[in-house]
Amino acid sequence: MLDFLVQKAYAFTTTSGSSSGASFNTLLGKILDNIANRIVYLLMAGAVIYFLWGVFVFIQNAENADKRTEGYQHMLWGIIGIFIMISAKGIINIILSTIGLLG
């Protein structure tokens, strides 16, 4: 099934008169642009929401040390998640510029 989908995507992106390398680059660019970037943005939004939830828990439970620690951990892991997603986006852009798809 996956082979069929890849063949259809490849056939969709090929144009008449272009070399197979250019059509593969077009296919790769469309996959990275349409799928990978959107996944990165979705995960980044999740990390931001997780961070904001940690801020909410931290502020709401200012008198409870255990809940403050829980909120702090949420904020810490949210920041780590945001950093990882920004790094992933940078790596995707490096790959795209290396193969000549990023202008």
Image: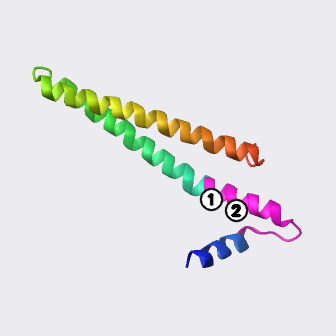
User: In this figure, which residue is indicated by the disc labeled 1?
Assistant: 31
2 and 1 marks in contact (CB < 8 Å): yes
Q: Quadrant of the N terminus?
A: bottom right
Label 1 element class: helix
Judging depth in this view, the residue of 66 and 86 nearest the camera is 66
Q: Does residue 97 show up?
A: yes
Percent x, y of residue 100: 78, 47
Judging depth in this view, the residue of 84 and 13 nearest the camera is 84
> Mark 2 is on which residue type?
Leu
Other residues around mark 1 within 10 Å, as few (<14) / some (14–19) / many (≥20)? few
Which region is colored magenta? 13-32
Q: Which mark is residue 95?
A: none
User: In this figure, which residue is indicated by the disc labeled 2?
Assistant: 27
Question: Is 72 displayed left or right of 94 in the figure?
Answer: left
Residue at the far left in the pictured view? 63
Query: Looking at the rendering, which quadrant does residue 89 occupy?
Result: top right
Q: Does residue 55 show up?
A: no
Other residues around mark 2 within 10 Å, as few (<14) / some (14–19) / many (≥20)? some
Percent x, y of residue 62: 15, 21
Question: Is 22 displayed left or right of 47 in the figure?
Answer: right
Label 2 element class: helix
From what the image shows, is residue 94 above or below residue 6?
Answer: above
- What whole-number distance in Å separates the C-alpha atoms at marks 2 and 1? 6 Å
Q: Is residue 17 magenta?
A: yes
Q: Residue at x 18, y 25 (%)?
A: 68
Q: Residue at x 13, y 22 (%)?
A: 65
Question: Is 78 displayed left or right of 73 in the figure?
Answer: right
Q: Quadrant of the C terminus?
A: top right
From what the image shows, is residue 101 above or below residue 85?
Answer: below
Residue at the far top in the pictured view? 63
> Mark 1 is on which residue type?
Ile
